[in-house]
Each structure stands twice: as structure tokens, then as C-alpha cells.
Image: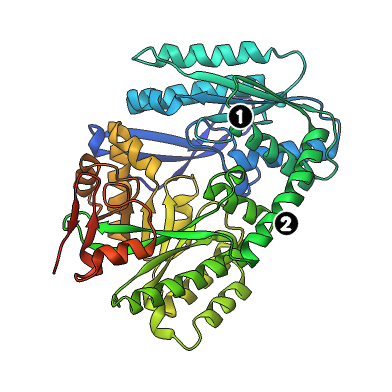
Amino acid sequence: MIASAPFRIAFADGNGPSVALTLSGWCLPDLGGRYFLALRDDNGPVAEPDQASDAETGLPTGAGFRGAVAQALARGGTTGTMTLVDLDGLNAVCDRLEAEETVVLMERIGTTLRSSAIDGSLVGRTSEQGFGLVHDASLDADHLAQALGELILAADPSAEGVRVRRGSVVLDGGAVTSEEAEEAVLYAIRKFGESKHGTVQLGTMSECCASMAREHVQRLARFKRTVSSDEFSTVVQPIVEISTGAIKHFELLSRFGRADEGSPQTVIAFAEDVGVICDFDLRVIARSLLAIDEADQAGSRQLNLAVNLSMCSVEHLDFIEAVDQLFAGRPETRSHIIFEITETARIEDTRAANNAVQALRRAGHKVCLDDFGAAASSFQYLKALEVDAIKIDGAYVTRALGSRGNRAFLKAMVGFCLEMDVEVVGEMVEDENTARFLDNCGIRCGQGFYFGRPQSLGTYLARARGVSLRKAVHRQSRRILTVD
């Protein structure tokens, strides 16, 4: 990808002073040298990071949408309905389109939603395939859902289209402060995402607040007990050099026993929301030290582990001090622990976060940005945080396999990182075809079921007994123990 330096241009409409905008451009060699141009208005108020616009639709991101709705509710006078829309299959449709066609489709989706929202502003993109808007009683939400479905179907070359689901929340002014309102909006979005029904009635905002409060109290008590009593398990999954099959290191993954708590990512996001993630991250680091000792006792002294850290934890100076205490008396272990910073939560203070990252690196740890490409903020974080590696989000890898446009962006992303001396790891390597694809893109390391499923460390140690642990490779198609 070749990017031009942005520059200012002025537009005059003959009815007043000219309007200055910023023009940027990109050339994608892998797409026949096509050029893409973007105009940005830098004259109005500068958006806060959480209120950044989605690059594809021009709509506010999920955090920006939640904040805008919360502020409107807190000011009072905002009534109507918040409608949430899930366009199941939108990613697949975009993968079947050329890059220019995807741009046009996403812009049309954004325009359709904006034209239906109050003041054209209370609207946003809540997820890859999800959107939300606040509208008055005159809007027929079923008609809007139908219009979106027809719009996408008309653009889809395979004529498969999408399955449109929608949910609704009546804005009755039940949330008092903007913080309470934002949490209630987030709660409603999460409940809608968990439902599989075509149409979901989520009640009023007051009811969402009451349900959220009860659920938070119960979940917080369970989570604190889980952390304090070590009532969670850990497994490991190998990160492998694609060309040789050699294991570079393992990632330590947490597992929670209660099915109703949701996925590990959901549990972690909750811990971040309620401010108890630091305690959990410290517990996991302590588990990693026990795993290193277990490997030593088994005769494998070259075990390297990657441990996930939340953005929320990294920003706190007292957390870094607590990490130092865990490694007190065993500084030689630091080089065996890699920290993967997850993007579940947004960084509030990038300078403080980078200071913490550099403190970890000076102490001997390598630091990796996890889930890279999953959020619009990824490149911002790569610029703000000096790290040793990035891990490309698995969904991004999967989409790149099926789309020439996404492949071009992935290659450009990898090239940029390699120029910055940043290592790249690809996630969700499920088969040999994906492994070869990543290798051709310049990605040297991969993680996924093709190389090994998450299992107990003891299982891998038993399999590697008698040979180098670094060379112990498990693939779905066959099992290999490659000796030195």
C-alpha cells in the first residue's frame, strides 16, 4: 500500500467562506494500482478517540454511538426507540464484492441508517455486522430492516443477501446519569447479540438498567470468588514457525467453568467493565510462573509463554509494580514470558500505556499487540505503543482468504510491520491452505488448530518427553514430533 501525505484543499460554494478539508489518498498495487481518496473535515470539534467514525460507513463507532445516546438521555427530552440491527452475512457479501463495490455498499448502508435517525446523528456501527440508531415513533422499524436487506441483496452477486435481525429498547428516560445510560445501552447491545431471535423486544431503558444492576452484582461476586479461589483453569496453544513447524512459544489461555458466563472474551470484557481485571491479570501471570516451573521439573527448560494483559491493566502504574513483585528473586524468568496486550478495552492514556510497555520491555519481556486488525484503533495503537510483535486477528485472516481486496490490505499491513521491525503472527490457522497463504503474505508464525489445539501444558510436555519441546508439533492431519 502506498499512501500520500494528507494535504488541505478548499471548497467554495458561492454562498460564503470556503470550506477547508483534508484530502488523503492510497494506492493498492495488488488491486491493479487503483487509487482510493478520502476527505476529512477537520474544522469542527475534534472527536474524542471513542467517538471516531467507522471508515466504511462514516458512522460513529460503537463506543461513540453509546456515548452520544447516553449524553442525549442524560440531557433529557430524548424519547423514542433505540433499534439495533444485525445484518447476518454482511461480511460474506463484502467478500464477494470488489473493493470499490464494498465501499459503495457500506456508504449506502450508512446513509440509509443516518436518514432514519433523530437529527441524523444518533446512529452508529456497534459491531462488524451490527448497527444501532435512535428514532421517533413515526419510523417503521420493520420497513427499515426490509430496506437494508433489499439494499444488500441487490448488491450481492450471488443473490444470497443477509438475514436481518432487529431489537428495540423504548427510551423512557429511566437512566439518570450519562454513565448509567451508557452502561444500559451497552447492556442492551450485549443482550441483543446473545439472542438468536429475528425480532427482540428488550423492554424500556429503565428495565435494562434494573436488569443490568442485578446481573452485575451477581456476576461481580462470582468473578471475585473465581479469582480469589483460583477457580479457573488454563490451557496452552502453540505459536509455530510456519516454514519449519518449530514451536516458538505457547500462549496461556484461561478457561471458566460456568457455561452461563459466556466465552472467555466475554468474561474478560466484564472484568474490565467493573474494574477488577488487574487482579485477574496478576493471577494469570502467577499461573504462568507455575507453568515455567512445571516445565523445568519435566526437563524442558526452554519453555516460553505468552500471557494476555488487558489494556486497562497496562495503564496502571501500580499494576506494573505488582508485576515486578511477582518476578522478584527470579529475573531470569522474565525473558520467558511474553505479554500480549488485548484490545478488548480502549486505551485512555496512550502515553502512560507506552511507558508501561517500555518498562516491561526493559525488564526483559517481549510485548505483542493481540487481535490486530479487529478494531479501527489498531494502527493508532501500533503508532502509539512501541512493541515487538503483533498478532493478526483470526477473523481478518479468514476474510483475507476469500477476498482479493482484504488480501491486499493484509499484505500491506504485514509489509508495514516488517518495515518497522515488528514480528507478525497470524491467528486461526485451521488448515494447510491457510498456513501457506500466511507464509506467502510474509507472515512467518501462525497459531490455530492446524498446529495444535488448546490443551493442558502437561499434555504437551508428555508428548515432547525425550525430544526438544520447541520441536513438538501437533497437526490435525497427522502428529509429528520433530527432533533436533
132 above or below 242?
Answer: above
484 above or below 419?
Answer: below
Circle 1 is placed at which residue position?
Answer: 195
Q: Are marks 2 and 1 in contact (CB under 8 Å)?
A: no
Residue 474 position, x and y percent, is 24, 54
Which numbered disc, 2 or 1, marks the residue closer to the eye? 2
Q: Nearer the viewer, residue 206 or 349?
A: 206
Q: Is residue 414 left or right of residue 329?
A: left
Circle 2 is placed at which residue position?
Answer: 221
Q: Nearer the viewer, residue 44 or 115?
A: 115
Please tell me which of labels 2 and 1 falls first in the chain. 1
Q: Is residue 364 visible?
A: no
Mark 1 crowd level (few <14, some 14–19, many ≥20, 10 Å Cα) = few
Q: Nearer the viewer, residue 113 or 165?
A: 165
Say which amino acid is labelled 2: Ala
267 above or below 134?
Answer: below
Q: Secondary structure at mark 1?
A: loop
Q: Is residue 456 left or right of residue 135?
A: left
Residue at the left extreme of this rendering: 484
Residue 288 position, x and y percent, is 45, 70
Residue 246 position, x and y percent, is 21, 61
Instruction: Give the residue at x 49% y 24%.
Output: 88
Instruction: Give the residue at x 33% y 42%.
Output: 397
**Quadrant in which the N terminus is drawn:** top left
230 above or below 24?
Answer: below
Instruction: Give the residue at x 45% y 44%.
Output: 374
Residue 43 position, x and y percent, is 61, 42
